[in-house]
Amino acid sequence: MPRTALLLMDVQNCHVPQVADDYLPHAVRALRTARAAGVPVIHVALQLRPGHVDAHPFNKTFGALPPHLFTADDPGTAIHPDVAPADGEIVVYKNRVSAFTGNNLQQILGAQGIDHLVLAGIATSGIVLSTALQAADLDYRVTVLSDACADPKPAVHDTLVSDVLTQRGEVTTVEAWGHTLHTGA
């Protein structure tokens, strides 16, 4: 029987203020929906090593970051308290854009027998897109929760969820996904 997990990605203190104010309640609802249905939740967050020894200077995204940002000591790196991990929920730290990079996420998913990933997080043009593409290439079934994803550029979010991500998996809302959990669809 297929097993589903919710990946709640990069909902960190530093990212939440960069998206629309109405985003966070959708992420909270996705988290509550998963927990209520017994769907495993895996939190994914960006965290670099002190001094950014894992960020190549040629990398446009990470190479120019000030060395104190996105380290374990940076309060902005913490997962937002409204979606904080519950006891027993897995937290995976990544050091690039995709949720699969710089960690053992794929090993964890395999050990748990998970073959369907439901994606939520910030930013649609970053972790959501890159993780959806990589997950599809790794033969996971992918569902993107359009209202539990957000991007600093709303027009980019809209294009990705309506035109791009639909080519790699299903795109739905938290409410519609919740209905499928209750009906077994």
Image (tube, rainbow, N blue to C red):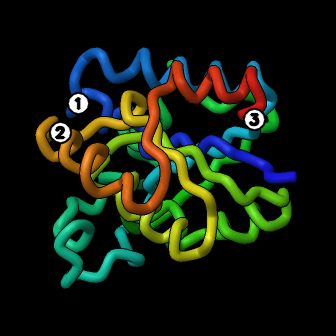
Residue 50 in sight: no
Q: Distance between the residues labelled 2 and 3?
A: 28 Å
Q: Where is 154 relative to 112, above or below?
A: above
**Horizontal relation, residue 132 to residue 141: left or right:** left
Q: Which mark is residue 19?
A: 1
Q: Nearer the viewer, residue 54 or 176?
A: 176
* 176 over 51 or under it: above or below: above
Q: How far apart are marks 3 and 1 (CA)?
A: 26 Å
Do the residues under discs 2 and 1 have CB atoms within 8 angstroms? Answer: yes
Question: Residue 164 in the image: x percent, y percent?
Answer: 29, 57
- Amino acid residing under circle 1: Val
User: Is 52 left or right of 181, judged from the image as shown?
Assistant: left
Please tell me which residue lies in front, 81 or 101. Answer: 101
Element at label 3: loop
Question: Mark 3–mark 1 contact, CB under 8 Å?
Answer: no
* Residue shown at 42% from the left, 30% from the top: 148
Q: Residue at x 74, y 21 (%)?
A: 182
Q: Mark 2 points at which residue?
A: 152
Image location (x, y in percent) of residue 172 = 45, 35
Does 45 sit above or below residue 136?
above
Q: Is residue 54 left or right of residue 21?
A: right
Q: Which mark is residue 119?
A: none
Tag 3 residue: 39
Mark 1 lies on a secondary structure that is loop
Residue drawn at (39%, 77%) of the image = 53
Quadrant assignment for the C terminus? top right
